[in-house]
Image (spheres, rainbow, N blue to C red):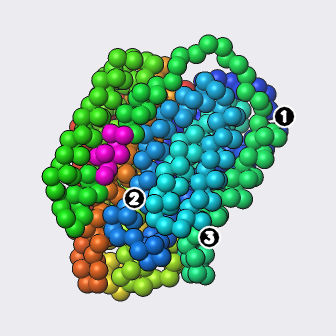
């Protein structure tokens, strides 16, 4: 469900597409292609959270394994998102879109047919690789197909449809689970993928040869993936039943060392890197990166835990648990545009400082969710308050990211911000072992502890905005 909150971050890639695509004979069908392709990531990212209890019972998965059901997907998506966009620029966006969508579909079939946990996790990892290929290239195709006001309308349609898919996906997935099988939630991806491939093959213009280009940053992509993987494994083990063993501490050191080496390699590559270090010369960009990491980390943990607790502790059906989060994308769709306009008039600093504080208040309201978890008195007030706070932050965040760096780095900045949002969810999920392992009366108590930590993390996001972001109004060309 947190994918709904990523929409504005992702849309910046469409706004900042640098290369003009060959003229499309059917631009509306190109828009439909990008919507179908992107919907794979939106639906899958939210549906799986609803399916975790059923997957755990079916495959005998413990808390650590359930964490990896989520993170095996988020890991390659977080680490390879920028590399996927660069690969599209080099090898052709249409080719990467079709290949990524096909890979995602095959991996989804693997998830649905998985005889055991190991096959499911491998398939989830491949899904993440496919998403890292299709997401940036579907948005780049969208941005290059339309210009001027038509581009704004197309991005608005894409974002609204993505929010609708984010809302309907968990409800439909929960309904399928209630019918008897978590495997069906992965089969949902197949018709979407088939439609996207067919439309891309038929209506997206063929890629043009842009001549000799810089080689891809394969070393950076590998170091980021392995480093994040090692750190995620260590956090998953450390937050589990056995605590911080020598192996977990050692793997933490390995992960941090690999990520430090990644930063060193990126510095040597300069502007050819997948993460140009020149981005961090901007104080505002550093603040926005910290805000994104903290805020989306808190949200990533919450949107894994809410359906899990509602199903396991309060005995909600899968359909009801999926529907519990529907107010979030609906409120975001209504309030984000006017909040973006407000930030354009007064500058992004104040909305970005206040929004996470309102989200933190929503987290504190979630402390009222107990074993009975009455929806209208306990769950809805928390979700609605979180949605209001998030609406104040999402649109200003995207605009502030684009304005925080010079023009030649806007594409890298928006892509990196989107990757950081996923990384926040990756880290948060890795730390949920104690909650997912809790049973009976211990589960609400462990949930409340995680909620308090999430509220503190939102406050840290607010502090990052207040201390580091420059309060500049939006430039006219960015509106």
User: How far apart are the alpha carbons under marks 3 and 2?
Assistant: 20 Å
Q: Is residue 446 left or right of residue 315?
A: left
The residue segment tinted magenta is: 226-233
Q: Residues within 10 Å of mark 1 (few under 14, many from 20)?
A: few
The residue depicted at 42 percent of the width and 27 percent of the height is 219
The residue depicted at 35 percent of the width and 46 percent of the height is 229
> Compared to 362, does 178 lie above or below?
below
Q: Residues within 10 Å of mark 3 (few under 14, many from 20)?
A: some
Identify the secondary structure beneath mark 1: loop
| Viewer-side residue, 295 vs 471 | 295
Q: Position of residue 456 (x, y in %)?
A: 23, 56
| Viewer-side residue, 208 vs 474 | 208
Query: In this orientation, does residue 325 appear?
Result: no
> Compared to 224, does 176 lie above or below?
below
Identify the secondary structure beneath mark 3: helix
Tell me which label, 2 or 1, sits earlier in the chain.
Answer: 1
Taking the view exactly as shown, the residue that stands out farthest to the right is 25
Q: Is residue 106 magenta?
A: no
Give the residue pinned by disc 2: 68
Q: Residues within 10 Å of mark 2 (few under 14, many from 20)?
A: many
């Amino acid at each position: 469900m947190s994918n709904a909150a990523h929409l504005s971050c992702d849309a910046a890639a469409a706004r900042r597409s640098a290369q003009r695509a060959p003229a499309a004979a059917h631009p509306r069908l190109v828009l439909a292609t990008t919507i179908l392709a992107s919907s794979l990531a939106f639906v899958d990212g939210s549906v799986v959270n609803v399916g975790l209890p059923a997957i755990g019972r079916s495959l005998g998965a413990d808390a650590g394994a359930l964490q990896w059901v989520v993170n095996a997907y988020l890991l390659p998506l977080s680490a390879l998102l920028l590399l996927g966009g660069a690969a599209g620029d080099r090898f052709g966006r249409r080719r990467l879109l079709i290949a990524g969508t096909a890979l995602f579909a095959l991996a989804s079939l693997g998830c649905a047919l998985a005889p055991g946990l190991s096959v499911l996790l491998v398939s989830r990892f491949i899904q993440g690789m496919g998403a890292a290929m299709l997401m940036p290239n579907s948005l780049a195709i969208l941005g290059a197909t339309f210009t001027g006001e038509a581009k704004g309308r197309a991005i608005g349609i894409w974002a609204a449809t993505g929010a609708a898919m984010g809302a309907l996906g968990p409800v439909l997935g929960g309904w399928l689970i209630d019918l008897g099988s978590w495997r069906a939630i992965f089969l949902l991806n197949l018709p979407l993928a088939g439609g996207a491939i067919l439309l891309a093959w038929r209506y997206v213009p063929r890629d043009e040869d842009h001549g000799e280009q810089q080689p891809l940053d394969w070393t950076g992509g590998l170091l980021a993936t392995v480093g994040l993987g090692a750190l995620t494994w260590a956090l998953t083990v450390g937050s589990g039943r056995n605590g911080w063993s020598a192996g977990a501490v050692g793997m933490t050191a390995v992960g941090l060392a690999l990520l430090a080496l990644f930063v060193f390699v990126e510095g040597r590559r300069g502007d050819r890197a997948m993460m140009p270090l020149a981005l961090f010369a901007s104080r505002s960009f550093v603040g926005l990166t910290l805000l994104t990491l903290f805020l989306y980390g808190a949200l990533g943990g919450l949107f894994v835990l809410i359906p899990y607790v509602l199903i396991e502790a309060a005995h909600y059906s899968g359909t009801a648990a999926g529907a519990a989060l529907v107010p979030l994308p609906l409120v975001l769709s209504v309030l984000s545009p006017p909040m973006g306009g407000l930030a354009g008039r007064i500058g992004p600093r104040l909305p970005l400082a206040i929004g996470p504080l309102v989200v933190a208040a929503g987290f504190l309201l979630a402390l009222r969710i107990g074993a009975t978890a009455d929806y209208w008195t306990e769950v809805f007030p928390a979700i609605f308050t979180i949605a209001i706070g998030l609406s104040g932050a999402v649109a200003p965040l995207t605009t502030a990211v684009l304005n925080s760096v010079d023009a030649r780095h806007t594409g890298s900045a928006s892509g990196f911000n989107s990757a950081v949002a996923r990384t926040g969810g990756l880290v948060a999920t890795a730390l949920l072992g104690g909650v997912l392992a809790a049973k009976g009366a211990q589960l609400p108590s462990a949930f409340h502890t995680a909620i308090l930590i999430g509220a503190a993390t939102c406050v840290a996001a607010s502090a990052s905005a207040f201390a580091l972001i420059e309060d500049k109004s939006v430039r006219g060309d960015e509106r």
